[in-house]
Amino acid sequence: QQQVKQSPQSLIVQKGGISIINCAYENTAFDYFPWYQQFPGKGPALLIAIRPDVSEKKEGRFTISFNKSAKQFSLHIMDSQPGDSATYFCAASKGNYGGSQGNLIFGKGTKLSVKP
Amino acid sequence: NAGVTQTPKFQVLKTGQSMTLQCAQDMNHNSMYWYRQDPGMGLRLIYYSASEGTTDKGEVPNGYNVSRLNKREFSLRLESAAPSQTSVYFCASSYSYGSGYEQYFGPGTRLTVT
C-alpha cells in the first residue's frame, strides 16, 4: 500500500522554466509534508516543508502548494536552473515526532533535469 | 560539526557473509533511522530508534538487525547477506522544532551483494 504517490517519475525543464512535481497522500492523519532534494552520490536534504493549516509556503524560488480537501501537495520551482537538477522526494508524517507516529513516508522520487 | 557520518562508503559482499554498517551523529539528536534506497522505490525505512535504548521495526526490517549503542551511534547489521540487499543505505537523525521536524541524512553506504 503506497501511502504517498509522487509524479512524474522524471521531468525535463528548460532553464528559466517552472518545474512542478505532484504528490498525493491517503492518510488524513498526516500533518507534516516535507520535500527533500538529493544530488547524485549524496544523502537527501530538507528543502521546504508545510503543515496543512496553510495552503502555500514559499522559500525563494521554491513553493509548496497544499490542497487538504484533495489530499494533494505539490512543489513548484520557479526560474529553474541547471543547478536544480536532482531527485526530489515528497514525504508525509503524523505529528508525534520521534516516535512511530512521526516517521516519514516517502514518495518514490522525481528526477529533475534542467537543460541550459 | 560533521553531522551524520557513515562507514564504509562502499562494500561488496558475497552471499551469506555478514557485515555491520556504522552510523554516528554529533548533533545530539534523540532519533535515528536506517533507510534503504533502491531505484524507483524511494526511501524505505528499515529500523528506527526514537531514543537511546529503544529500537523499532520500519517498513522493511527482514534480514537486518540494529543496535543503538549510545545517543550518537546506531549500527545496522546484515547477518547473512542476500543479493536482494544490494542497495544504498542511508542513516539519518532528527530533531523536532515548533512546526515540524527535520531529518539529517548521512552520505550513504553503497552495498553490493554478489
Image (tube, rainbow, N blue to C red):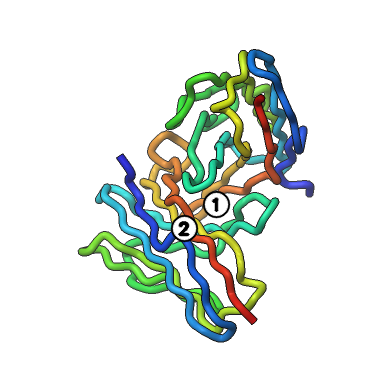
Q: Amino acid at mark 1?
A: Glu
Q: Are marks 2 and 1 on the same chain?
A: no
Tag shown at residue B11: none
Q: CA distance from mark 2 to mark 1?
A: 9 Å
The residue tagged with tag 2: helix, strand or loop? strand
Q: Which residue is mark 2?
A: A34
Q: Dots 2 and 1: beta carbons under 8 Å?
A: yes
Rendered view: B16 above or below B111: above
Relative height, residue A109 to residue B59 (above, below): below
Report the amino acid beneath label 2.
Answer: Pro
- Residue appearing at x 58%, y 21% in the figure: B82
Look at 42% across and 42% down and name the residue there: A102
Q: Residue at x 49, y 68 (%)?
A: A11
Left or right of residue A100, residue B71 in this image: right
The image position of residue A52, as x and y in percent, is: 33, 62
| SS label for mark 1 | strand
Within 10 Å of disc 2 (Cα), the crowding (few <14, some 14-19, many 20+) is many
Q: Which residue is mark 1?
A: B102
Residue positioned most to the front: B114
Dot 1 alpha-carbon crowd within 10 angstroms: few under 14, some 14 to 19, many 20 or more: some
- The percent coordinates of residue B69 (x first, y second) are 67, 22
Can residue B99 be spotted in the picture? no
**Chain identity of mark 2:** A
The part of the image, by quadrant, that contains residue B74 is top right
The image shows residue A20 at horizontal and vertical percentages of 43, 73
Which chain hosts label 1?
A: B
Q: Position of residue A96 (x, y in %)?
A: 40, 42
Q: Quadrant of the C terminus of chain B?
A: top right
- The residue under the point 78% across, 49% down is B1
